[in-house]
Image (spheres, helix red, strand yellow):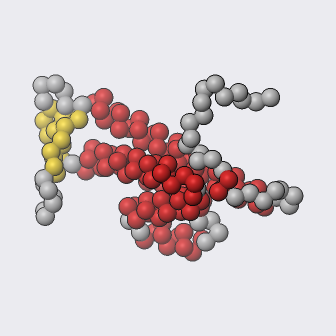
Amino acid sequence: MDQTIELALAEILISNLNTAEMVLKTWPQNRQIKLLQSLLRDGFPRHITEVDDFIKKIEATRTERNKIIHFIWGKVDPEGAAFLTSFRPFRKDQIDSKTAPEVQAVADTMHDRVNDLYKVIYIFREQRIQSRQKHALPHSRKSYPWPLTKIPQNTPRGP
């Protein structure tokens, strides 16, 4: 997921390569996510709530992933859940447990967030390509729908 966040930032900042390089090489992931949120808010000003919800989902998924990766794993309880603990200095102790299906659910959610990020990348890439075409109509992401809007199933598609 972190790599896809960086790909999204690189795509959005492609016309500012020095800035993109500095951000991606030196900023921690949490700051990169806040920058992504700001850039998406600028790019989709009519969809601020959707952008903020999307970023919250990314942050929540990363938090769950980090628990699985970075906590100290303990013995499995009788129900098959492994205990996770974190006793970092100067921080609140955290204790949790996860079953194998719960770990898989976190992985599935990460997969969904990565796919969502690719949809966002596609919109920015499409806009950039259209702006290079000689006779293309001028477009702005401001007129694009939020790329993660669910299309009603009854909506006709194609000719």
* Number of callouts: 0
Query: Residue visible at 30% across and 45% down?
Result: 64
Query: Residue visible at 13% across and 62% down?
Result: 89
Question: Where the C terminus falls, by quadrant?
Answer: top right
x, y percentage for residue 79? 16, 24
Relative to 114, residue 35 above or below: below
Relative to 76, residue 122 above or below: below
x, y percentage for residue 42? 56, 62
Question: Image check: 17 left or right of 157?
Answer: left
x, y percentage for residue 155? 66, 28
* Nearer to us in this view, 29 or 46: 46
- Residue 1 in view: no
- Residue 28 quadrant: bottom left
* Nearer to us in this view, 76 or 155: 155
Query: Residue visible at 62% across and 65% down?
Result: 14
Query: Residue visible at 35% across and 38% down?
Result: 106
Residue situated furthest front in the rendering:
46
Relative to 139, residue 105 above or below: above
Question: Image check: 99 left or right of 152?
Answer: left
* Nearer to us in this view, 83 or 159: 159
* Nearer to us in this view, 142 or 80: 142
Question: Image check: 21 left or right of 95?
Answer: right
- Residue 56 in view: yes
Question: Image check: 6 left or right of 158?
Answer: left
x, y percentage for residue 58? 41, 49
